């Protein structure tokens, strides 16, 4: 079980290219005691893609989470407050 909450919500907005994208990333436990890295992405305000990857150890999941976060940061995504889909 994860001892810390790992969640990241980033956006990449470039009005000159008509680009407004989001990327959400989190680590969550599964029902079977494994650890999942959950990610979703797409155009802001629209439904996008989702993917989950299962890991047997928390260390592997955290390493993968951080690698994905670094990759998105290099591509111009900037962390912002909360994921608007989490607000009721």
Image: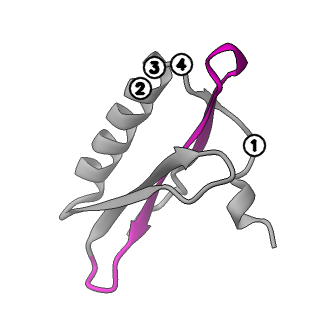
What SS does tag 2 mark?
Answer: helix
Q: Dot 4 corresponds to which residue? A: 76
What SS does tag 3 mark?
Answer: loop
Residue at 65% x, 25% y is 18
- Compare marks 1 and 2 and give the one earlier in the sequence: 2
Separation of residues labelled 1 and 3 (CA atoms): 19 Å
The reply, left or right, for residue 18 in relation to residue 57 is right
Quarter where residue 28 is shown:
bottom left
Separation of residues labelled 2 and 4 (CA atoms): 10 Å
Q: Are marks 3 and 4 in contact (CB under 8 Å)?
A: yes
Q: Dot 3 corresponds to which residue? A: 75
Q: Dot 2 corresponds to which residue? A: 70
- Compare marks 2 and 3 and give the one earlier in the sequence: 2
* Residue sitting at the far right: 88
Residue at 29% x, 40% y is 63
* Residue sitting at the far bottom: 31
**Can you say whether 3 is above or below 31 in the image?**
above
Residue at 31% x, 66% y is 35
| For discs 2 and 4, the disc positioned in front in the rendered view | 4
What SS does tag 1 mark?
Answer: loop
Does any portion of residue 62 appear in the rendered image? yes
Q: Which mark is residue 81?
A: 1
- Compare marks 1 and 3 and give the one earlier in the sequence: 3
Number of marks: 4
Separation of residues labelled 1 and 2 (CA atoms): 18 Å
């Amino acid at each position: 079980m994860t001892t810390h909450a790992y969640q990241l919500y980033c956006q990449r907005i470039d009005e000159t290219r008509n680009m407004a994208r989001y990327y959400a990333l989190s680590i969550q436990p599964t029902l079977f005691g494994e650890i999942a890295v959950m990610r979703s992405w797409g155009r802001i305000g629209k439904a996008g893609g989702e993917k989950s990857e299962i890991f047997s150890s928390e260390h592997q999941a955290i390493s993968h989470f951080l690698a994905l976060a670094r990759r998105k940061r290099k591509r111009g995504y900037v962390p912002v407050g909360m994921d608007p889909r989490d607000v009721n």
